[in-house]
Amino acid sequence: MNLRGKIEITELSDTGRVREHNEDAVTSNIDIGLMVLADGMGGYNAGEVASGIAVQIVADLASEGAAREERHGIDSHSGLMRQSIVLRDAVYRANKIIYQTAQSQTNCEGMGTTIVACMFYDNKVSIAHVGDSRAYRLRQGKLDQVTLDHSLLQELVDRGFYSEEEAQRSTNRNYVTRALGVEPTVEVEVHEYDVLPEDIYLLCSDGLPDMVEDEDIHLTISTFNDSLDVVGQQLVDLANDHGGRDNVSVMLAQVKEAFPAKKGLFAWIAGLFRS
């Protein structure tokens, strides 16, 4: 199912005010409702290499998987929708390629990247992430962070050492506990959510929430949501106005109308017996 006209997507990536290079990478494919964002780390240009590999591998494999797999159905082993499996396995593959590149090329030694990716289908969205790049959802005026950072600070919040408010003010926010390319294997967190018309989803690197509080992110999206391009630019400008200490990347998707999957005759008949 082609999602053009069903979903609007915009993306923006900026070097910021302090860094010399942009180690973030973003890509999207509106036809299959895919957005991918990665925030690289490592010396010299290695961060750029890691994030570039991540978004390219995930985009390519997700596109191939979307064409090959059924557009609906649940995997019997994991309980996840097949689109979630495609997305998760693409991230696994990206981790393997980045790790092998880091091991084989001395100028890439120690590189890694966070990643957050989402795929829309059948009035749902699958979100996969590793690290502290985030996904938010604005629904009916309420902004929710729908991913939890894989970071030391988040672990301290989970254990009760910090409140959410204290964590937002903490200067120790950037130690990630999970990233692509650091180990031969990685645990990919995957969640599935129902989607409603007018929902807005935001993917961002940590350069945004490190500089801009969630309340201001919420206000910006709510104020300028008539134009996703304006929202994206305003968010990047806010991060830079508050210091721009890191690269900042944002991707936004707004659901324009419902996009249920087309069911075949067999699925329709089976549904009658289940009802």
Image (cartoon, rainbow, N blue to C red):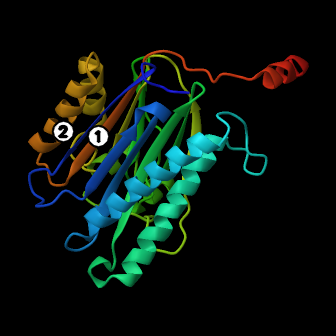
Q: Could you tell me if the residues under marks 2 and 1 are in contact, i.e. CB atoms within 8 Å?
A: yes
- Name the residue nearer the viewer: 111 or 237: 111
Q: Which residue is mark 2?
A: 236
Q: Residue at x 18, y 32 (%)?
A: 233
The residue that appears at 37% across and 77% down in the rendered structure is 102
Dot 1: element: strand
Residue at the spot 39% in from the left edge and 54% down from the top edge: 56
The residue pinned by badge 1 equals: 250
> Which quadrant holds the N terminus?
top right
Residue 52's quadrant in the figure?
Answer: bottom left
Quarter of the rendering containing residue 182: bottom left
Tell me residue 218's x, y (percent): 31, 28
- Give above or below for 30 relative to 27: above
- Residue 150 or 48: which is nearer the viewer? 48
Q: Quadrant of residue 202?
A: top left
* In the foreground, 233 or 265: 265
Quarter that holds the C terminus: top right
